[in-house]
Amino acid sequence: MQAPPKRPAVGERTLTLKAVPFFTQLSDRELDVVRAVATEKNYPKTAVVLTEGEMGDSLYMIQSGKVKVFIGDEDGREIILKILGPGDFFGEMSMIDKQPRSASVNTIEASLFLVLSHAAFEKCVEQAPRIGNMVMRVLAQRVREADRKIGTLALMDVYGRVASTLLELSVYSNGKLMVGEKLSQQDLANMVGASREMVNRILKDLSERGFISIESKSITIINRELPPSL
């Protein structure tokens, strides 16, 4: 049985808040205001945190662990919108407007969250008004990201979407450019809106042409100039 994630000490919680884009520019006093009204929640691996369409009013800040944000259809098919880790957050839209959740969130590994409800957020804004401005900035950034993703889905073929997603997820590790998540082919298919068989074909082609290498679900980018299509 997987052990629950360790709860951070007060000082670590302040550092966690500073890592969240909402709160990066806040002073320690302002962060104390947030910490005073936020609650902590633990979830085991593969747990349902939020469900698309349910009512909600809370923002979740990831202190430890990892989650996937996705939308689904009646046939059980998923499109993964994002994979988030420590310092990331989700649920901000329902926190602000208290409307149904626009996506579902499941844990990929045991996770610990700081949770801020709508009422708690209003208290924060009263005592630390700058938080309201930061919310507007982050929402604008999220809208821009959504516009870019819609453009990618609309204008690129599946090959281009796979290549674009691999580059978007890549980070430098030990001098190599690697996809930061160990994704299954089905995960990647769910991110680009394609079948697993099509993604398998594209990854095989990219590997054979020397653009990537694959080992135990770890993908290394060998050539950043990934081809846009077959």
Image (spheres, rainbow, N blue to C red):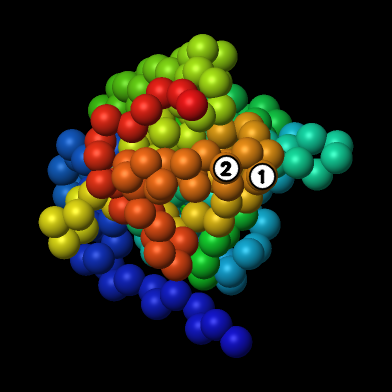
Residue 217 shows up from this direction: yes
Give the residue displayed 32% in from the left and 42% down from the top.
Answer: 211
In the rendered image, the vertical position of residue 150 relative to residue 64, given as above or below: above
In the image, residue 119 lies at what x, y percent?
Answer: 53, 39
Q: Is residue 74 left or right of residue 12?
A: right
Marks 1,2: beta carbons within 8 A = yes
Q: Residue beneath label 1, please?
A: 197
Residue farthest toward the bottom in the current orientation of the protein = 1
The kind of secondary structure element at disc 1 is: helix
Residue farthest toward the front in the current orientation of the protein = 208
Q: Is residue 35 left or right of residue 90?
A: left
Q: CA distance from mark 1 to mark 2?
A: 6 Å
Q: Residue beneath label 2, please?
A: 201
Give the residue displayed 37% in from the left and 41% down from the top.
Answer: 209
Residue farthest toward the right in the current orientation of the protein = 74
In the image, residue 198 lies at what x, y percent?
Answer: 63, 39
